[in-house]
């Protein structure tokens, strides 16, 4: 916390050697009243969770596996915006610290040369339509070597070390992510989602690309990604000129 230039983000840190998933640990702390910005870090996760029920490979000492407690004042409908904000924060921190030009694939995968280097999982606990808290889970493949990847990830995953050609200081990167999170959260509180959406669009590899996506109802749509709408949904323009919002799910570039 000494090298940390923040007021709330990361001012309380729980460091674990091995855990099932830092999402669970952060959730428990949030239930016990942990304030916004409380951070849980683990050297290894035995059952790291990804989006859409996937697993997240979290080998010991090689990455950043962490979860942050968020206490947003906005209703549940605004949580996609927090997901995008977190992606912008991680992307900016990676660029600032390593110079590697990571880009954001909607909603929140960070890619380098088309391979995934980081993923974000935002989970919310609600009560009567109110958000009690959110947990922003961040996984970054920092110092994995090519041989550290299991077969099924060897063509889709990459690490900062592989891309930058040198070891990256995990502590410095965590501090940078927390600083960006705090900075962007202040911007969001003061000016709303618009400036965040502009930053996201500038860092995104999804914009102006042809994408195939599934809507929340599981309907397949195809078109060009033209931007974010005010709620944080991705807007796709079909070949017929129709604009469709994609609220959840995955896209193929
Ligand atoms: C995804 O891209 O599917 C999201 C991956 C999120 C992984 C992080 S690692 C820290 C936190 N704990 C988990 O179990 N998952 C998130």
Image: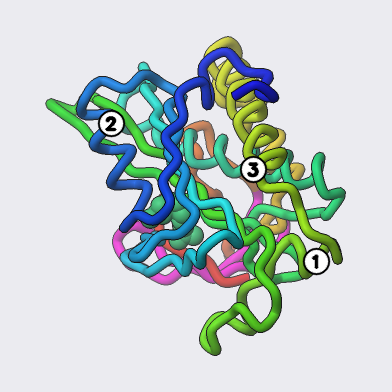
For marks 2 and 1, the one nearer the N-term is 2
Q: Disc 1 designates what residue?
A: 163
Point out residue 9 in the picture as x, y percentages from the top left corner: 53, 23
Point out residue 132 in the picture as x, y percentages from the top left corner: 24, 25
Which residue is at 44% across, 46% downward?
137
* Quadrant including the N terminus: top right
* Secondary element at image label 3: helix
Q: Is residue 236 visible?
A: no
Of residues 36 and 105, the one nearer the viewer is 36
Q: Is residue 8 visible?
A: yes
User: Among all residues in the image, which is located at the extreme front?
Assistant: 17
Point out residue 193 in the picture as x, y percentages from the top left corner: 56, 25
* Secondary element at image label 2: helix
Q: Disc 3 designates what residue?
A: 90
Q: Quadrant of ligand 1?
A: bottom left
Residue 48: mark in rendering: none
* Quadrant including the C terminus: bottom right
Stretch in magenta: 208-226
166 lies above or below 85: below
Q: Quadrant of residue 113?
A: bottom right
Is 209 part of what is drawn in magenta? Answer: yes
* Secondary element at image label 1: helix
């Amino acid at each position: 916390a000494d090298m940390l230039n923040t007021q709330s983000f990361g001012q309380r840190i729980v460091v674990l050697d091995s855990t099932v998933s830092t999402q669970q640990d952060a959730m428990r702390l949030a239930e016990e009243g942990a304030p916004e910005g409380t951070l849980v870090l683990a050297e290894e996760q035995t059952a790291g969770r990804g989006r859409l029920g996937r697993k997240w490979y979290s080998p010991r000492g090689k990455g950043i596996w962490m979860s942050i407690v968020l206490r947003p004042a906005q209703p549940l409908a605004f949580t996609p915006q927090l997901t995008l904000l977190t992606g912008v924060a991680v992307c900016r921190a990676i660029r600032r610290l390593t110079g590697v030009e990571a880009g954001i694939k909607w909603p929140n995968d960070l890619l380098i040369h088309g391979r995934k280097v980081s993923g974000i999982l935002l989970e919310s606990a609600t009560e009567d339509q109110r958000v009690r808290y959110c947990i922003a889970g961040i996984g970054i493949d920092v110092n994995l070597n090519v041989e550290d990847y299991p077969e099924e990830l060897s063509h889709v995953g990459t690490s900062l070390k592989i891309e930058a050609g040198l070891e990256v200081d995990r502590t410095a990167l965590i501090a940078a992510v927390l600083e960006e999170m705090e900075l962007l959260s202040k911007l969001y509180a003061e000016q709303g989602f618009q400036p965040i959406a502009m930053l996201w669009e500038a860092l995104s590899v999804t914009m102006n690309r042809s994408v195939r996506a599934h809507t929340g109802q599981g309907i397949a749509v195809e078109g060009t990604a033209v931007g974010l709408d005010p709620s944080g949904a991705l807007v796709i323009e079909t070949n017929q000129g129709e604009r469709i919002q994609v609220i959840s799910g995955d896209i193929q570039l």
